[in-house]
Amino acid sequence: MILIDYKDPRPIYEQVVDRFRLLILNGGLKADDKMPSVRMLAMDLSINPNTIQRAYAELERRGYIYTVKGRGNFVSDTDKFRDEYRTEIFGRLDEICDDACKAGITAGELTEHIEKRSEEGEKRNKEGGNGE
């Protein structure tokens, strides 16, 4: 379900948060789906259960999951998060476009690059990658 990149300088719990966040946002996990148990995920990833617990606490704090006492963790309804994430992405893209224009990169070059990256991402997703 998720993979840890030990070359990534970020703490492992942040990687777990980001991987689940993307799975939730792209529909890999849907509203009310049960999250893997802390113990099972820790065993699968060969990491300390406290790390998973910290990641789940952060996901819950951000509203991506909720806890049902005695039953586990579940995915929240994330439609609003999807919209917020799209807005964030387009905001970052606006900044990049502004920088590109200042550097003399044409709209055609930007479009070509975006189309190429989009095709590569779609191909990775079809092959089972996460598009990162």
Image (tube, rainbow, N blue to C red):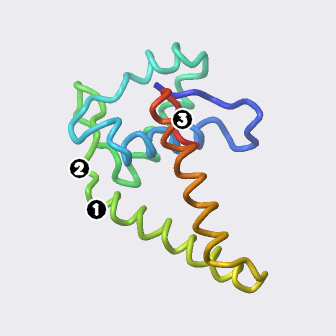
Give coordinates of residue 85: x percent, y percent: 42, 62
Give coordinates of residue 39: x percent, y percent: 45, 17
Instruction: Tell which of 86 and 108 is nearer to you.
Output: 108
Q: Is residue 11 above or below residue 72?
A: below
Crowdedness near tag 2: few (<14), some (14–19) or many (≥20) residues, C-alpha within 10 Å: some
- Label placed on residue 124: 3
Give coordinates of residue 131: x percent, y percent: 53, 41
Q: Amino acid at mark 2?
A: Asp
Q: Residue at x 47, y 36 (%)?
A: 125
Q: Nearer the viewer, mark 3 or mark 1?
A: 3
Q: Which residue is mark 2?
A: 77
Instruction: Tell which of 101 and 35 is nearer to you.
Output: 101
Crowdedness near tag 1: few (<14), some (14–19) or many (≥20) residues, C-alpha within 10 Å: few
Q: Are marks 2 and 1 in contact (CB under 8 Å)?
A: yes
Q: Is residue 103 above or below residue 113?
A: below
- Label placed on residue 80: 1
Q: Residue at x 58, y 67 (%)?
A: 111
- Give the mark nearest the N terminus, 3 or 1: 1
Q: Are marks 3 and 1 in contact (CB under 8 Å)?
A: no
Q: Nearer the viewer, mark 3 or mark 2?
A: 3
Q: Residue at x 65, y 83 (%)?
A: 98
Q: Amino acid at mark 3?
A: Arg
Give coordinates of residue 65: x percent, y percent: 32, 43
Q: CA distance from mark 2 to mark 1?
A: 8 Å
Q: CA distance from mark 3 to mark 2?
A: 26 Å
Element on which disc 3 rests: helix
Quadrant of the rendering where the C terminus is positioned: top right
Q: Amino acid at mark 1?
A: Lys
Element on which disc 1 rests: helix
